[in-house]
Amino acid sequence: MKKVFLLLAFLAYALICSAQIDKTKIPTDNKLKTKLDSLVDRSVFTFMNNNSRVGISIGIIKNGKQFIYNYGSTQREKQELPTGSTVYELASISKTFASTLLARAVLEGKVNLNDDIRKYLKEEYPNLESNGRPITLLNLANLTSGLPNWMPDKDLFGKANPDDIPYILDSVHKKYSRQDFYRDLHNVKLQAIPGTVSRHCNTAAQLLGYIMESVYNDTYENLLKMYFVYPLKMKNTSLLKSGKIPTKMAKGYDAKGRIMPIIDWEDLQVAASVVSSISDMLKYMAFQLNEKDAAVKLSHEPTFGKAEDNAIALNWKLKKTNNIMSISHTGGSLGFSSYMIFYPDLNSGIVLLSNEADQNTQNELIALSDVILKP
């Protein structure tokens, strides 16, 4: 009983404190003319009521209509309100482009989801199977490959100060080439039998991208442009490349307010290095909502687990609640956090892009999306 009383007292205190904060201190382009405007404003205020937060852009499709809201700043050093064209790292949402491309390759008869990935590798990799089960293209796309999350597959940190970890990662991966990736792939020990355990895997996503390059005989950068950027008219979407930062890109920060390195690493381009704006991501979400497109539909089919208990499609997470299917993906880099969830049956969805990353940001973006658009 005492614990319940303390919890209620804490919640009451939090509400009083939040009520005392001046909302006008959070810059925004929200016009506050509609019920949705007001709902977004109240909800975002809760998210931004944290000294670590810098800026956020929100894109909503509701019953087919599109809305954009921006709050905060693109950087801490000076006030600059984000716009629909401000560029953010998508982090792991990047993976969904490659898996949609895989679905297209399947429909075009170029590959089969159950193909052994070694069919598309130039060297021999006897280690890429376990208990007689090889890694398949499907395993790369539905997180069940058993590959290590990172390459190189070794302890990079030792007893390093946690504050130094982002910079250690950056120094290692800036020098880690495709050749290094394939060399170290020979020594990988699978962490599970392929197809049995689903877990986040940057290595699998990157390898899928390399295979798509081989299948289409083109660079992944060109494939991204050909199948997404050009047809969807995504003017602010590209792959991060070393030394080439988009002019409209926000600065990303950690919880301590430090500017973080960007993920312009060659070995994670497919897995985490697509950057985009909220206006472009609304176009991408509208594309993903259109399940009349056979590749989109295939990429949304559950391939591991049951939708009622959470399932994995081709990189997308599926959840059916009250007979309504949600399709989602999170993203978190060193200095950016993102979340995208949509409901094809309702022709609705929401994308949230933030230029700050800490251990709570992604979960708070998920909570924010639930308040604003949960069916």
Image: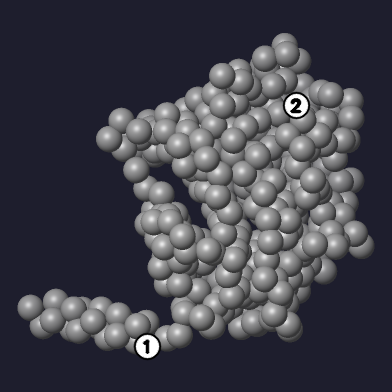
Q: Position of residue 237 (x, y in %)?
A: 77, 47
Q: Is residue 174 left or right of residue 343?
A: right
Which numbered circle lies on residue 302? none
Q: Position of residue 48 (x, y in %)?
A: 50, 74
Disc 2 residue type? Arg
Residue 323 against residue 43 in the figure, above or below: above
Q: What's the residue at 89%, 25% (across, down)? A: 217
| Residue behind mark 2 | 118
Which residue matches tag 1?
20
x and y, in percent, of residue 273 in the image: 75, 52
Above or below, comparing residue 10 to residue 277 in the picture = below
Question: From this viewpoint, which residue is outermost toward the left?
Answer: 1
Q: Amino acid at mark 1?
A: Gln
Residue at the farthest right position: 243
| Residue 157 sits in quarter | bottom right
- Find the distance from the CA under tag 1 to the CA under tag 2: 61 Å
Residue at point 69%, 80% (across, down): 79
In-front residue for pair 178/106:
106
- State whether residue 199 appears in this view: no
Snapshot quadrant of residue 115: top right
